[in-house]
Image (cartoon, grey):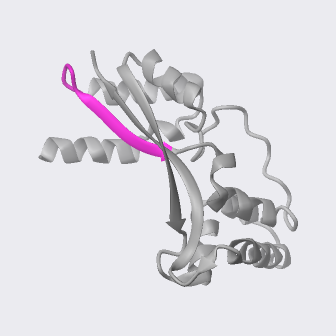
């Protein structure tokens, strides 16, 4: 059991989704592969493409009405959505020598506020989503306006049971040959 927990911790700390580029992504997965026994299996979840994740995209678009756009990142840049394109994720896994790579798309509805309502959802969107990176370091007036815009964007998802926003992620599995 301890070995399984160590692998999970390694995946959390060195997730390939945050690797810095093409070669770095392959090296990150290769490091994970090297920790596996022969025929060992790796499994992890990562966000799908940003366009398929309104929980992150809509707050970002709302913030852009008040703060400058984030600088354009090159494809496969190190962010939460780096493994979003299925073809890229599969290529990285196979280039690292893993086989029987499977990607299973999961479409879900998240309570972005985790039971804390709209205020908590806004805090979450600004804490873990790209809108937070756009707002960070901006003048107070711009940041406040962006935060209000994020709140307005998320308000349409507020229901009695929470702030229910669509999301998409991949469950990726593979085997070391």
The magenta segment: 36-46
Q: Is residue 79 magenta?
A: no
Image vertical order of residue 67 relative to residue 22, above or below: below
Find residue 131 and report its image quarter.
bottom right
Tell me where residue 44 appears, x and y as whole percent. Answer: 38, 41
What's the residue at 70%, 78% (across, down)?
Answer: 155
Tell me where residue 174 appears, x and y as whole percent. Answer: 34, 27
Tell me where residue 177 appears, x and y as whole percent. Answer: 27, 15
163 vs 175, left or right, is: right
Of 34 and 1, the residue lying toward us: 1
42 vs 81, left or right, is: left
105 vs 143, left or right, is: left
Find residue 98 and report its image quarter.
top left
What's the residue at 76%, 77% (across, down)?
Answer: 152
Q: Is residue 38 magenta?
A: yes
Tell me where residue 121 appears, x and y as whole percent. Answer: 59, 75
Q: Residue furthest left?
A: 1
What's the residue at 79%, 67% (across, down)?
Answer: 138
Image vertical order of residue 93 relative to residue 160, above or below: above
Of 81 and 162, the residue lying toward us: 162
């Amino acid at each position: 059991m301890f070995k399984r927990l160590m692998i999970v911790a390694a995946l959390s700390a060195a997730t390939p989704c945050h690797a810095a580029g093409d070669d770095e992504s392959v090296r990150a997965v290769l490091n994970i592969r090297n920790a596996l026994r022969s025929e060992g299996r790796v499994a992890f979840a990562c966000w799908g493409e940003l366009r398929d994740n309104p929980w992150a995209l809509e707050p970002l678009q709302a913030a852009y009405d008040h703060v400058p756009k984030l600088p354009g990142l090159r494809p496969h840049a190190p962010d939460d959505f780096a493994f979003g394109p299925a073809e890229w994720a599969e290529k990285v896994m196979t280039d690292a020598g893993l086989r029987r790579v499977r990607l299973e798309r999961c479409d879900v509805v998240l309570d972005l506020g985790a039971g804390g309502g709209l205020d908590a959802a806004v805090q979450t969107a600004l804490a873990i989503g790209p809108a937070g990176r756009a707002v960070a370091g901006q003048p107070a007036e711009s940041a406040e306006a962006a935060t209000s815009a994020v709140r307005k964007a998320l308000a349409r998802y507020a229901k009695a049971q929470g702030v229910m926003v669509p999301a998409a992620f991949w469950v990726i599995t593979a085997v070391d040959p």
